[in-house]
């Protein structure tokens, strides 16, 4: 049973619309859909509490910056007595093209520093995650500037479809289970 949805990103206006903040964007879309208003600052995160399908669920946006996401996540798990397999972490993935989602039940960090931080702090790779494709720059030396850049105009139409599918994917994970939502989440968007 999923009790916690954690979208990864960097706090502040400077990073708001960047590729690296797609996890925050998806949590924001869920907040809008669920008409949530009040948030609290707790466990190094912006937290929103709601009920989905009659169950308590927390939506979190860690405010520790991406590379220290694990500090917020370990706080959340301990404070709310949530097991790692009862959360889903949502984050950007360079190895997937924009328009692709990949729901996985566990796995390595794949080189993503936010996921590395979470694995290091909670001491397990066994937690569901929704990887959101952002594509990769042609020049591998441009990765940092690429992930910290906004989506361009041509990408925005596809981004909205990604955000919409991600939101529905996460709701299915909460209402049913991540296992039962894999086919829906991993299906082509376009």
Image (cartoon, rainbow, N blue to C red):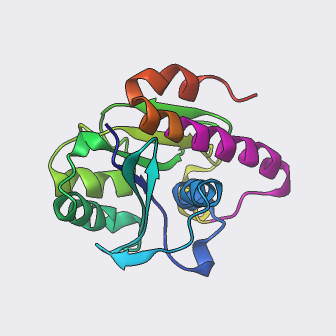
Residue for point 22% across, 57% down: 77
Q: In the image, is residue 137 above or below residue 11?
A: above
Q: Where residue 39 appears, x then y in whole percent?
A: 47, 74
Task: Read off the magenta span.
Answer: 149-170
Residue 22 lies in quadrant: bottom right
Q: Where residue 88 appears, x then y in whole percent?
A: 38, 44
Q: In the image, is residue 44 above or below residue 83?
A: below
Magenta-span inclusion, residue 120:
no
Residue for point 33% across, 44% down: 109
Whether residue 95 is visible, yes or no, is no
Is 131 on the left-hand or right-hand side of 32? left
* Quarter of the C terminus within the rendering: top right
Number of numbered labels in the structure image: 0
Q: Nearer the viewer, residue 142 or 13?
A: 13
Q: Where residue 92 appears, x then y in whole percent?
A: 52, 49
Magenta-span inclusion, residue 163:
yes
Residue 129 lies in quadrant: top left
Residue for point 20% across, 46% down: 83
Whether residue 75 is visible, yes or no, is yes
Q: Nearer the viewer, residue 116 or 62?
A: 62
Residue at the farthest front position: 54
Q: Nearer the viewer, residue 82 or 26?
A: 82
Q: Nearer the viewer, residue 184 or 121?
A: 184
* Quarter of the N terminus within the rendering: top left
Residue for point 66% across, 64% down: 149
Is 165 on the left-hand or right-hand side of 11? right
Q: Which SS does the magenta portion mostly show? A: helix
């Amino acid at each position: 049973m999923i009790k916690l949805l954690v979208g990864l990103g960097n706090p502040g206006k400077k990073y708001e619309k960047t590729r690296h903040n797609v996890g925050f964007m998806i949590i924001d879309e869920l907040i809008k859909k669920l008409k949530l208003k009040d948030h609290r600052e707790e466990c190094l995160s912006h937290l929103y509490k709601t009920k989905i399908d009659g169950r308590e669920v927390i939506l979190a946006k860690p405010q520790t910056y991406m590379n220290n996401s694990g500090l917020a996540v370990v706080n959340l798990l301990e404070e709310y007595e949530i097991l790692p397999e009862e959360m889903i972490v949502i984050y950007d993935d360079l190895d997937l093209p924009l328009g692709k989602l990949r729901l996985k039940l566990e796995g390595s960090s794949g080189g993503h520093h936010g996921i590395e931080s979470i694995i290091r702090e909670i001491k397990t790779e066994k937690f569901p995650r929704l990887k959101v494709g952002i594509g990769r720059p042609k020049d591998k030396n441009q990765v940092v500037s690429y992930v910290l850049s906004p989506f361009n105009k041509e990408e925005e139409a596809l981004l909205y479809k990604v955000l919409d599918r991600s939101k529905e994917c996460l709701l299915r994970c909460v209402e049913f289970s991540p296992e039962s939502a894999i086919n829906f989440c991993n299906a082509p968007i376009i």
